[in-house]
Image: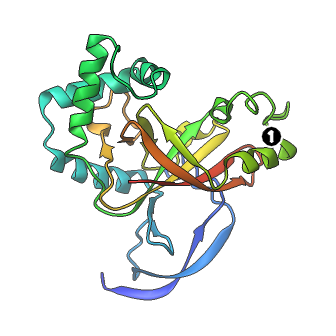
């Protein structure tokens, strides 16, 4: 029953995926030949380039819990990660302001950063995987944050074309840590920018849901000072979100 067979798999490549328990909405579909489990009813989608995307909460959580058990984090590392999830801006703000330089940071924040950095020596992805993040218009910077949305909340297409010219095909560096999720869930429904991170096998990334302050986010944390390449930018079918595809550099 679990043997792999070659058949055509249709996957959503530009649409928004939202869930409310079992609800699922997908956008435009495109078909690729891919090995998938015969009749296995798996809701993990292999893409043509072999990146895995979860669309089912329970399957995503089971996968994440399995990874977390492998990390063997110390109590100090767990505590620092929990503190981060409680108020990420408290740590990321100073890191961004200092372009990743920890010199001059308050002693307590510097200590937490050291422990979080240490945890990444134990946390990595066992396979290529898709992670999601939702952002507000401020992600696009002062040139676009106040003009990218029309009054009705839809994307201003003329401004979007300028955004693509500015960002598509370019690298972006984040001096703070990057909080992502295993699923594109309802928590992102109100965010106008959704980034789909392609994360390569062996990349530093940690599933920290079991020790997160706010449960249910299925959070995967990426290291500070990560760089990623924005390979594609599309407007979602509902015309209210920009879907960014980005490859995380190792």
According to the picture, the residue beneath numbered tag 1 turns out to be 154
Q: Residue furthest bottom?
A: 6
Q: Tag 1's secondary structure?
A: loop
Most foreground residue, 117 or 87:
117
Question: Does residue 154 appear to the left or right of 229 in the view shown?
Answer: right
Q: Quadrant of the C terminus?
A: bottom left
Q: Please say if 13 is above or below 192.
A: below
Residue drawn at x 27%, y 52% is: 124
Image-quadrant location for residue 232: bottom right
Residue 221 image offset from top left, x and y in percent? 37, 40
Image-quadrant location for residue 233: bottom right
Residue drawn at x 24%, y 27% is: 114
Question: Does residue 244 appear to the left or right of 234 in the view shown?
Answer: left
Residue 41 image offset from top left, x and y in percent? 42, 71
Q: Residues within 10 Å of mark 1 (few under 14, many from 20)?
A: some
Q: Is residue 172 visible?
A: yes
Most foreground residue, 10 or 169:
169
Q: Quadrant of the N terminus?
A: bottom left
Q: Is residue 23 visible?
A: no
Residue 54 image offset from top left, x and y in percent? 44, 58
């Amino acid at each position: 029953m679990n043997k792999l067979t070659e058949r055509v798999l249709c996957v959503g490549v530009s649409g928004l995926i939202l869930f409310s328990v079992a609800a699922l909405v997908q956008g435009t579909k495109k078909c690729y030949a891919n090995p998938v489990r015969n009749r296995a009813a798996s809701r993990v989608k292999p893409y043509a380039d072999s990146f895995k995307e979860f669309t089912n909460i329970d399957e995503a959580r089971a996968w994440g819990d399995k990874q977390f058990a492998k990390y063997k984090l110390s109590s100090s590392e767990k505590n620092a990660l929990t503190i981060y999830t409680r108020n990420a801006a408290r740590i990321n703000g100073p890191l961004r302001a200092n372009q990743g330089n920890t010199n001059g940071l308050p002693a307590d924040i510097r200590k937490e950063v050291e422990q979080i950095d240490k945890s990444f020596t134990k946390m990595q992805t066992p396979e290529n995987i898709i992670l999601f993040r939702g952002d507000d218009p401020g992600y696009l910077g002062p040139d676009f944050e106040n003009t990218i949305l029309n009054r009705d909340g839809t994307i201003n297409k003329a401004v979007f074309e300028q955004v693509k010219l500015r960002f598509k095909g370019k690298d972006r560096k984040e001096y703070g840590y990057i909080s992502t999720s295993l699923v594109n869930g309802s928590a992102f429904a109100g965010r106008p920018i959704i980034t789909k991170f392609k994360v390569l096998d062996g990349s530093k990334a940690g599933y920290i849901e079991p020790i997160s302050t706010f449960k249910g986010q299925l959070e995967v944390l990426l290291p500070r000072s990560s760089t990623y390449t924005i390979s594609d930018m599309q407007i979602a079918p509902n015309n209210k979100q920009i879907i960014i595809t980005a490859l995380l550099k190792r």
